[in-house]
Amino acid sequence: MLDKTHTVEQLIVDKTVKYFGKQNIFNAIIKSHLRLENYGEYGVQFEDYHDRAMFALFSDLYAELMERIDQFESKGDIADDYVYTPKYLNGKKLTPLGKEISADGLD
């Protein structure tokens, strides 16, 4: 989990991108959130915007992983110009798909 307030962590991200190439780094970066740390104690509330946003972020991470696996299996590698387009959370805003996330999973 990344805490962007620490410049060392941002430097690590920058070096990682430089070393591996942007196409080999996931678009979704899980930032440090106290909410994530407290899920075990308080549970998840799907009525809460912030909980939905966390699930949307992880849904995008999963969707990106699946796209990358599909590319690798069909082409043998990830295209140099590959860029994942978020489907569930765009910046800090839920997309229509992100608003549909339920306890049963993604539709």
Image: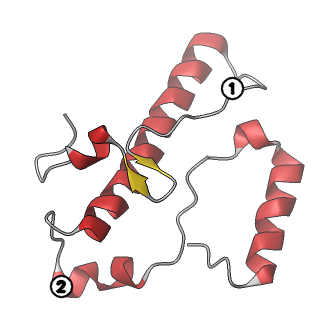
Instruction: Name the residue: 20% across, 88% down.
Output: 41
Residue underneath mark 1: 78
Instruction: Name the residue: 61% across, 73% down.
Output: 2
Q: Position of residue 60 (x, y in %)?
A: 43, 45
Q: Given contact means CB atoms under 8 Å apart, are the residues at marks 2 and 1 in contact?
A: no
Q: Position of residue 15 (x, y in %)?
A: 86, 61
Q: Is residue 7 left or right of residue 3?
A: right
What amino acid is at disc 2?
Tyr
34 up-or-down from 45: above or below:
below
User: Which secondary structure, mark 1?
Assistant: loop
Q: Nearer the viewer, residue 71 or 53?
A: 53
- Res. 42 mark: 2
Q: Quadrant where the N terminus lies?
A: bottom right
Instruction: Name the residue: 61% across, 22% down.
Output: 72
What amino acid is at disc 1?
Ile
Q: Nearer the viewer, mark 2 or mark 1?
A: 2
